Image (tube, rainbow, N blue to C red):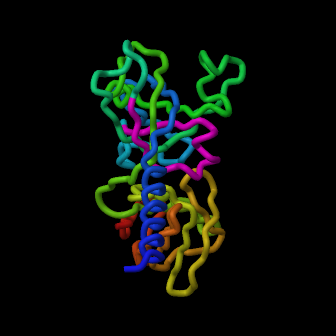
Amino acid sequence: MGALQLTVIYLILLLTSQVISKEEQWKSATATYTKETDGSIITEGACGYGDLHKASYGKYSAGLSTMLFNRGSTCGACFELRCVDHILWCLQGSPSVILTATDFCPPNYGLSADYGGWCNFPKEHFEMSEAAFAEIAEKRADIVPVQYKRVKCERRGGIRFTMSGSAHFCQVLITNVGLDGEVVAVKVKGPKTGWIPLARNWGQNWQSNINLIGQPLSFEVTASTGRTVASYSVAPANWQFGQTYEGKQFK
């Protein structure tokens, strides 16, 4: 093997290692928690998931500050968090927890970013459920320093499509998305149509103004990395508003 070939291989390995280290790099942020009766965030948030237990996210959910929320496009993404650099509040061994982005933590510019205005721009902050927070820190803490990184979402079953709207306005809520978790594009198709791009309404609710009633529906979901999965005839011809249908999953 020549010197030029060895140099090329070395450069490829170097670039690959840099990409991997960048993906695995921990970033600094802060975290607080909201008090719920069962220790979980169960109320409908800015991502539109509704009851988070039904959406399979439950207590492992978080509201994100403006910097992280990215106008809702981060909904469904997964983050690993660990409490760091606080001898009183962080649990020993620095255990981590994996959360799904399900809500927006709004800024409060009437309060200091150091006390109360945790989600003020440009801070990076996670508002966790009480139960999830207790897995990494003492609940007596008001706020703790954390490190976080994006991780792949592990989901059971396929991507779920929940229908709502009317004959002239069809809306689809996308949940239980694996791997990236973050959906950037959705298309729908019936036997009488080609693939129709849906527009993001809010969070992970996607809409179309075309009447799709009476047709079996197929969906194509594109994740933030550009990967696409198509689920054919997921909703039968007699599908109903308010019903949820399960398709294929990212692998």
| In the image, farthest residue toward the right | 110
Magenta stretch contains residue 144: no
| Residue found at x 45% / y 40% | 26
Residue 128 in view here: yes
Mark count: 0
Magenta stretch contains residue 78: yes
Magenta segment range? 60-82
Residue 57 screen position, x and y as percent: 38, 45
Residue 60 screen position, x and y as percent: 37, 39
| In the image, farthest residue toward the front | 3
| Residue found at x 61% / y 63% | 207
Q: Which of 122 and 181 is in front in this view?
A: 122
| Residue found at x 50% / y 38% | 27
Residue 158 screen position, x and y as percent: 34, 64
Residue 238 in view here: no
| Residue found at x 61% / y 52% | 202
Of the 4 image quadrants, the one containing the N terminus is bottom left
Of the 4 image quadrants, the one containing the C terminus is bottom left
